[in-house]
């Protein structure tokens, strides 16, 4: 059960350590005890993925909700588009590394354009490219924003 995952002291320690990280600055190879931050991510992801009814997509989403500034969600389509075997902890860590690289690239690009807020820039670019979210998606985003302010 997911409650067992959260109550596990080893997992609590990993979650606490990673709670101070974000996608822009994390160093996956940084040592933490006798392991690395990347290995912590793989272990948490692997443990969650094995929970009944969670799977690889659910594991990435659950981790995202534990730290929205670090964990990027994925699903089968995203795995395929990045040529990763869905479900693999190593694949998820590689994907996270690619997302860090992408975030850095986007930050560098918007600086060249005189922009400073990556989130605002991405929202404008998505709209310019024809992104038209559904009402449920907008409600999901609204709920996310509201819950973050509490």
Image (cartoon, rainbow, N blue to C red):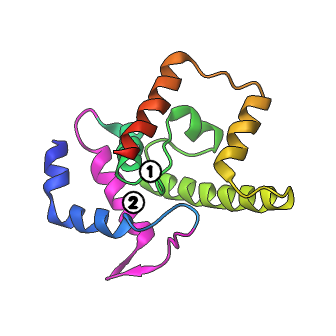
Q: Cα distance, mark 2 to mark 1? A: 17 Å
Part of the protein shown in magenta = 25-53
Counting from the top left corner in percent of width and height, residue 17 is at 33, 70
| Circle 2: element type | helix
Counting from the top left corner in percent of width and height, residue 69 is at 48, 55
103 part of magenta stretch: no
Mark 2 or mark 1: name the one nearer the start of the chain: 2
**Residue under circle 2?**
42
Counting from the top left corner in percent of width and height, residue 148 is at 40, 45
- Image quarter hosting the N terminus: top left
38 part of magenta stretch: yes
Asked if residue 25 lies left or right of residue 101, the reply is left
Quarter of image, res 100: bottom right
Quarter of image, res 42: bottom left
Q: Is residue 110 above or below residue 121?
A: below
Q: Is residue 140 above or below residue 38?
A: above
Taking the spot 66% from the left edge, 57% from the top edge, the residue there is: 103
**Residue under circle 1?**
68
* Viewer-proximal residue among 88 and 64: 64
């Amino acid at each position: 059960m997911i409650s067992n995952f959260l109550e596990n002291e080893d997992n609590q320690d990993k979650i606490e350590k990673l709670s101070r990280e974000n996608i822009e600055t994390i160093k996956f190879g940084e040592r933490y005890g006798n392991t690395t931050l990347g290995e912590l991510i793989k272990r948490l992801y692997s443990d969650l993925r094995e929970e009944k009814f969670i799977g690889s997509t659910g594991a990435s989403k659950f981790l995202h909700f534990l730290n929205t500034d670090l964990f990027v969600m994925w699903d089968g389509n995203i795995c395929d588009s990045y040529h990763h075997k869905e479900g693999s902890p190593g694949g998820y860590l590689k994907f996270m590394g690619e997302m860090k690289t992408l975030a850095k690239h986007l930050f560098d690009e918007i600086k060249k354009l005189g922009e400073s807020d990556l989130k605002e820039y991405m929202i404008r670019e998505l709209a310019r490219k024809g992104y038209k979210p559904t009402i449920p998606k907008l409600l999901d985003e609204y709920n996310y924003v509201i819950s973050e302010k509490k």
